[in-house]
Amino acid sequence: MKEEIIRLLEVSDYDYYRYLLNQDPIRKKIDEDTVDYLISKSVKCGEDEANKILGKYNNDDIFNIVKEMNLNIVFTDSSETGYYGYFEEPNKIVIYNNSIEGAFNFFEKYTDISINKEYIEKVVLAHELFHYVEYKNPNLFINTYKIELWSILKYTRRSNIVYLGEIAAMAFANKLIGKNTYSHILDYILLFNLDKKQADVFLQEITK
Ligand SMILES: [Zn+2]
């Protein structure tokens, strides 16, 4: 296995969540003491929503669950490969075949991890399904938690933390699929196939 992959495999979910939070545009406004709290609440938020769905749909296959929830899945090719897919309001999930293919080829070529394209599609689908859940439920922790940016006299500006939704989406996908979803490896592959230098920087950041 490539040395980079071995280092990647050693990264825990928690390490990756911490890294993601560090990327947030308003990270400087978050106290170091609050970081653990935000991660654990976001993870719980994602896991709770996954458990609700697993209970409701009897642990069915993710493809069936998404159809039962009346979401349309569109498979297409992307002109750029910076994403595996996205959720589009109100009920569409787009998955990029070429990005899935790129990830599959990477796993085949550089790792000992036995994975098929359908499994990668399931991971992406589960992640995007959370963004649908997030859109439908304004009361979720990740939607309601706001941080104070500044306060002058009676004016206070508050903002959401974008990456809490990403942390919750990954925790949701882990729970829904019930196995390793290789989230940070998949993110690394997107960069690797786009720009090897950026992928190196990413690897240094998440393994430090
Ligand atoms: Zn996402």
Image (spheres, helix red, strand yellow):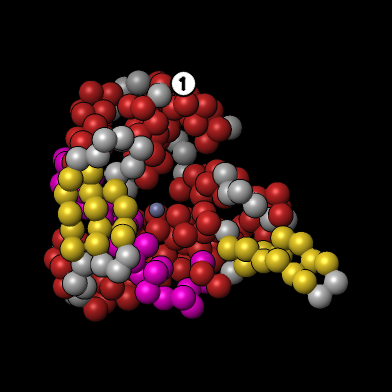
* Residue occupied by mark 1: 197
Report the span colored magenta.
113-142
Q: Nearer the viewer, residue 149 or 200?
A: 149
Q: Nearer the viewer, residue 201 or 87?
A: 87
Q: How many numbered markers are drawn? A: 1
Ligand 1 lies under 8 Å from the Cβ of mark 1: no
Residue 25, horizontal then vertical, whole percent: 61, 48
**Residue type, mark 1 in image:** Lys
Residue 187, horizontal then vertical, whole percent: 38, 39
Q: Residue at x 57, y 59 (%)?
A: 161
Dominant secondary structure, magenta: helix
Q: Nearer the viewer, residue 152 or 104?
A: 152
Would you place residue 91 above or below residue 107 in this image?
below
Q: Is residue 206 magenta?
A: no
Q: Give the quadrant of residue 131.
A: bottom left
29 displayed left or right of 187: right
